[in-house]
Amino acid sequence: MLAGSAVLYFLLVAPRRARDPQRLLTCFPAGGHPALYIDVQTLREAGVLDQLAGAAGVEEPDYKAFVAATGFNYRQDLDAVAVYFTPEARLIVARGRFHRAKLASYARSGGGRCVGQLCTVEGSARDRQISWTPLDNDLLGIAVAPDPLAAALLGKASRASEPLPPAPVWLTLPGAALEDRDGLPAGFSALLSSLSGASRATFAVNGAGHGFEIRLVAPFDDRLRAEASVKRLREATESLKTLLARTGTAVESGSLAESLTQGAFMADGTRVQGKWMLGPKVFTESAR
């Protein structure tokens, strides 16, 4: 499925589908923070969602209890989600089908409370307070933060729209996030260090040929900085190849390791562009 109709769906249908991610992104407060967008409906219709999420029978008991109490199951009720990563909170805007009365009852039954339409419950730790509030008929704002009312930061059309990549899955990182890489995996940290000095970096995933591709766009202030970044990216790719060869690591065709060693980069004026091709095996590996 992933190698055939799913890829074809991503390639031909998903880029044209008017999912309107701006509705979700404009609900976040102003400020430059990393943002992730996932068009869950496209993943579900392409047959990719179950591959990534795994079998329904292996879900945690807490999640199953949540589904039973609220009637909400992301596999069928969630259509899109955007996540805003601030230092204090994880802010989430979800588009789908939500039963507000059941969500409020779930909060109260778990020792939480509701003030108007804003509800809050304590998460797995005291500094992980989970709050949510409806933003529109099909939009729900959610926050995970020390502040039990953090979801109040979210609001319908609370900030201006911005250019977004035409892809069902993408991650955008502001320049500050490219400099502060504490806690990131070594490989991803090395990649971001090669983009140091960019005003932002956007990674977009879409279908291409017999697999998927990740496209990188990173604008710089001037051409020389963009060209220096491309040089660092190419050097990092060559270093990975050398490391794999030195350690005798077998690189399977279509695997993530092979994809990372075949990244292609160029400077288009002041913009750095990059591309990695991912085979279907990458997605089956991630689902294990």
Image (cartoon, rainbow, N blue to C red):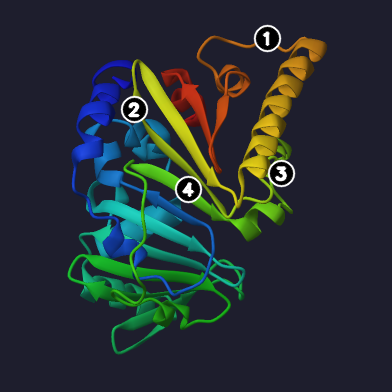
Instruction: Identify the residue at horizontal 33%, vertical 65% (top origin).
Output: 161
Q: Where is mark 2, residue-wise? A: 207
Check disc 2 and report its element: helix, strand or loop: strand
Q: Nearer the viewer, residue 5 or 130?
A: 5
The percent coordinates of residue 273 (x first, y second) are: 52, 35
Check disc 4 and report its element: helix, strand or loop: strand
Can see residue 179? yes
Instruction: Identify the residue at horizontal 67%, vertical 41% (top origin).
Output: 224
**Does 195 appear above or below 71?**
above
Q: Where is mark 1, residue-wise? A: 250
Which of pointers 2 and 3 lies earlier in the amino acid sequence? Answer: 3
The percent coordinates of residue 172 (x first, y second) are: 49, 51
Mark number, residue 104: none
Q: Look at the numbered discs 4 and 1 and tell me whether their residues touch, using CB distance below 8 Å.
A: no
Label 4 environment density (alpha carbons within 10 Å; few <14, some 14–19, many ≥20):
some
Label 3 environment density (alpha carbons within 10 Å; few <14, some 14–19, many ≥20):
some
Which of pointers 4 and 3 lies earlier in the amino acid sequence? Answer: 4
Label 1 environment density (alpha carbons within 10 Å; few <14, some 14–19, many ≥20):
few
For residue 129, side relative to residue 167 (left or right): right
Three-letter residue code for mark 4: Leu
Instruction: Identify the residue at horizontal 30%, vertical 23% (top origin).
Output: 7
Q: Where is mark 4, residue-wise? A: 171
Three-letter residue code for mark 2: Gly
Q: Look at the numbered discs 4 and 3 and tell me whether their residues touch, using CB distance below 8 Å.
A: no
Three-letter residue code for mark 3: Ser
Q: CA distance from mark 2 to mark 3?
A: 27 Å
Q: Look at the numbered discs 2 and 4 and tell me whether their residues touch, using CB distance below 8 Å.
A: no
**Does 32 appear above or below 229?**
below
Q: Where is mark 3, residue-wise? A: 193
Q: CA distance from mark 2 to mark 4?
A: 16 Å
